[in-house]
Structure formats: C-alpha cells, structure tokens
C-alpha cells in the first residue's frame, strides 16, 4: 500500500527554501547538492546553468544575511511545489555588491525518490520598491 501524501503547505515550502539559502550562505556544496537536482535549470544573475554547476560555485557565494519577504505558493500538489518571494540580500565584501539588494525568486521543487529536489530556480532584481 502506497503511503498517502499531501500538498505542501506554506510552512513546509518556506522550510525547503530556507534550507537552500542556508546551504548557500554557509557555502556548503554538499548540503546544496542534497537539495538541488543535478540537471536543474538555474537562472541566476542572468546566467543559466545546471544544479550541479551552480553547486560548484557555492564556495564563492557571498551572503552576510538575507530576509525572505512576500512568500507565496504559486502552485502545489503531492509531487511538486512552485514558490515565489522577494529576498533581500546583504553581502560581506564590497566587490560582491551586485549580489546585494532585493530579488524576485521563483523555485520549483519536485519530489524525487522520496526527497524534495529543486528542478528550477530563477531570480530577477527588483528594479523599483513598488514592484515588490
């Protein structure tokens, strides 16, 4: 008998998303790889790469702090969830100032072999405060 599964709620989805950001903040490639599918499509900072390729640059990631705002579930079912939110990032080094600021983020998570994995992630800088 197959175990019953349910749609992901807001708290569970936010926990998944926070786990991704915490892995990135700690520059923990292995933790990030546990969360992202190797072939995920990652479109960040205007560049496209796979989840595995993005995990390879985590060691250079610069995040002093972040705040997730306006978190919402776009759609969800028992096997997938797509979220959207605004993230406010602060960096440690001035040379990484392009990573600082507010960004719209959308992530699609898919249940694979019983674990949630990122299959798509994209960000876009918030150009005006009223565009949040």
Image (cartoon, grey):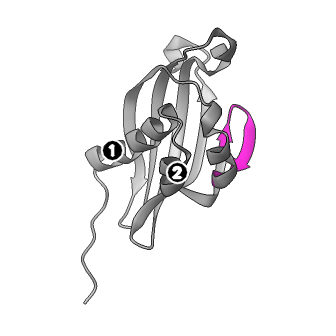
- Verify whether residue 47 appears in magenta: yes
Query: Among all residues in the image, which is located at the extreme right?
Result: 47
- Tell me if 78 is positioned left or right of 132 in this view: left
Report, in whole angstroms, how far the alpha carbon at label 1 lies from the one at label 2: 18 Å
Badge 1 is on which residue?
15
Picture residue at 27% right of the left edge, 44% below the top: 11
Question: Up-down: is 114 above or below 2?
Answer: above
Report which quarter residue 92 is drawn in.
Answer: top right
Q: Nearer the viewer, residue 98 or 24?
A: 24
Query: Alpha-carbon neighbours of circle 1 within 10 Å: few (<14), some, or many (≥20)?
Result: few
Residue 13 percent across, percent down from the top left: 35, 48
- Picture coordinates of residue 58, whole percent (x, y): 60, 38
Q: Nearer the viewer, residue 17 or 107?
A: 17
- The part of the chain drawn in magenta is 43-51
- The picture places residue 31, in percent across and down from the top left corner, at 47, 49
Determine whether 8 is above or below 19 in the image. Answer: below
Is 43 situated left or right of 16 in this image? right
Nearer-the-camera pick, 121 or 95 = 95
């Amino acid at each position: 008998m197959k175990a019953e599964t349910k749609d992901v709620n807001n708290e569970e989805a936010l926990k998944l998303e926070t786990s991704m950001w915490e892995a990135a903040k700690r520059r923990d490639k292995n933790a990030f790889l546990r969360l992202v599918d190797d072939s995920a499509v990652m479109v960040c900072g205007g560049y496209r790469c796979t989840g595995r390729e993005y995990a390879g640059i985590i060691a250079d990631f610069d995040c002093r702090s972040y705040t997730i705002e306006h978190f919402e579930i776009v759609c969800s079912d028992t096997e997938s969830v797509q979220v959207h939110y605004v993230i406010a990032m602060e960096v440690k080094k001035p040379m990484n100032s392009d990573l600082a600021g507010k960004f719209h983020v959308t992530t699609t998570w898919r249940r694979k072999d019983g674990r949630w994995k990122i299959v798509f992630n994209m960000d876009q800088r918030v150009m005006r405060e009223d565009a949040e």
